[in-house]
Amino acid sequence: MRLSKLNKQVSLGLLVFGLVSVSIADENESRGFDIAARSDRSDIGFKNSKVEMKMILQNSAGKSSTRSLSLKTLEKPNEQVGDKSLIVFETPADINGTALLSHAKILDADNQWLYLPALKRVKRISSANKSGPFVGSEFSFEDFTALELNKFTYKFLRSEKCGEFTCDVVERYPTYDHSGYTKQVSWVDNTHFQVRKVNFYDRRGDLLKTLSLSEYRKYNDSYWRAHKLSMINHQTKKKTDLLYSDYEFGTELSDRSFTKAVLKRVR
Amino acid sequence: MLLAVKSYGSEEIKVSGFIAAEVRIFTQDAKYPGQSDDINYSALWQPEFRLNSGSNQFSFIPFIRKDSEDEERTHADIRELYWRTSKSDWESLVGLNRVFWGVMESRHLVDIINQTDLVEDIDGEEKLGQPMLQFSYFQDWGALELFLLTGFRERTFPGESGRLRTALPVDTGQAIYESSREQGHIDGSARYSHTFGDWDIGGYYFYGTSREPRFQLNTTQDRLVPVYDIINQVGVDAQYTSEAWLWKVESLYREGQGNSFLAVSAGFEYTLYQFAGGQKDLGLLTEYHYDGRDETAAPTIYDHDIFIGVRLAFNDVQDTSVLAGMTIDNSGNERFYNIEAEHRIGENIKAELKIRLFTHGQPGSLISQIEQDDYIQLQLRYYH
């Protein structure tokens, strides 16, 4: 009798405790999502953009090589539809004119086509290669293509100083298939709501890479863009810097600028 | 010319392209009298001139090869010389251009707009510039492309001293045409292509001079003479992309070159990304080739053949990759082994290695005629 009463009290207590911890977890999840959403939505309305990039790949001995490429992006304001992007390589010279067209989806596999200029061939490629290195760099395909808000779930961890700002530290977990990460921890400043740093944890849960985003500039009084992205691989000691030059926004780009047919005339 | 171009706008002509040195070593003595047994040295130059003002694009790509052993392999061509105007839902192009159709890796069955530059490579991927008027129309329901091909290009063949030739050399100077206008016959093609979710499909109709010739003996019975028929051909190609699988099919039906026939190629490519826990990707390829043609049509080695191969992408800074494969003939057991590897050196040099072996040739077959022409080729390209 007493025992069963105790049992009842204990289970009631556990239930209450469970509810409290669930609601705390819920709160941290929704707060994490809100922070990510505020950061993502601070970007909305740019319609499209064009930018030139330099990619500097450095091995563990410090030897570096450079690639230059251009990136065009078409914004899909609906968060349930992914953006479209077109990357065209200029150097090294032997891959000049090589282009990668991506139609991002949220949870379905992205559609991707590669253009090989020597054969003038457009090839649909598998987008299952999320975690593979992008053109030999420390960035993987998913680091470029998986930046949609709804491709992750979130959890708020804490707030802390980050350089001149105070940052919200948010963990995010990929919800799409084939990710090479178990989780990412991002630092989002709560002044401009921009991502300042991301730690990437591999499939074993070990720290794999750190991405630092810097040299932010504001365009059209609305959109912040980082102009330097540094990715350091802690396991291989290799590093890739992405240097962006001036962005252009609100150009003539439309859906028709992101079709297979366009790949043949990228240069 | 330069002035006219400069006055067009603020755009500049961009110059790129490559110069290359190549060596081909044949591991066996030549099979036929007159063929060279020496190491084959070549120099190549392909400069590329482009002007791009957004809606107007100009391209000029000449090509020249000087070969040490085969005067037919020493040749020049204009790969591209065109003016293209494009708007969001249409484009037009006038001039010489190259157009590739198809999805398979080991045989390019449906690819037909351009003539094969066979002395460059036996893999059918090197093409001669094709004069054309092209108009393309892009809508949400797909892309429609119309081609008027104004002038036929003859296939290149090795000369008497060249390797990788038929027992009797091909005399391109005596080519026979079904059309009385010969190379002046205007060919035409219309192609539709679109993406439906995971499917990329295309289909076309072609009417005109067959790019693949049949052969006849010449009057002195010591040379083959290419015969170019007027054909009607329909072709389709499709790829289904799902996860790491690419499922592919190409098919054509040709009428007008001997007995009408159907040909089908089908297969898959499956990629193991970050293979064995490293950075490399390993692709596994299998393709089956069926060809219903008989001896009244152009000869082909792909009648009932299976290709199996692997592609290893190193995903390194030098973009190193290796493709190794074997094509086996089901009926005669003939085999064609192919290994291709490439690697960048520094920022501007690319090294390309090709090894090709031909074995188990059956009497009289195409493979048997080149079975002593196994070779190793190394090409060094400097991109400027």
Image (tube, coloured by chain):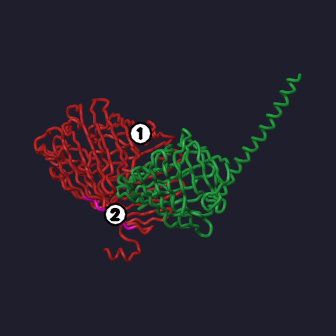
Chain colours: A green, B red
Can residue A1 be seen here? The reply is yes
- The type of residue carrying mark 2 is Gly
Q: Is residue B214 magenta?
A: no
Location of the N terminus of chain B by quadrant is bottom left
Residue at numbered disc 2: B95
Q: Is residue B46 magenta?
A: yes
Residue at numbered disc 1: B283
Q: Residue at x 35, y 74 (%)?
A: B5
Image vertical order of residue A107 relative to residue B55, above or below: above
Q: Nearer the viewer, residue A128 or A203?
A: A203
The x and y percentages for residue A42 are 64, 61
Q: Nearer the viewer, residue A188 or B88?
A: A188
Q: Main secondary structure of the magenta part?
A: strand
The x and y percentages for residue B237 are 43, 45
For residue A195, which numbered disc appears in the image? none
C-alpha separation, residue under disc 2 versus residue under disc 1: 37 Å
SS for callout 1: strand
Crowd class of label 1 (few under 14; some 14 to 19; many from 20; radius 10 Å): some
Are circles 2 and 1 on residues that touch, CB within 8 Å? no
Report whether mark 2 lies on the same chain as mark 1. Answer: yes
The region drawn magenta spans B45-51
Image vertical order of residue A22 relative to residue B48, above or below: above
Q: Earlier in the sequence, mark 2 or mark 1?
A: 2
Read off the chain for label 2: B
The x and y percentages for residue B78 are 28, 60
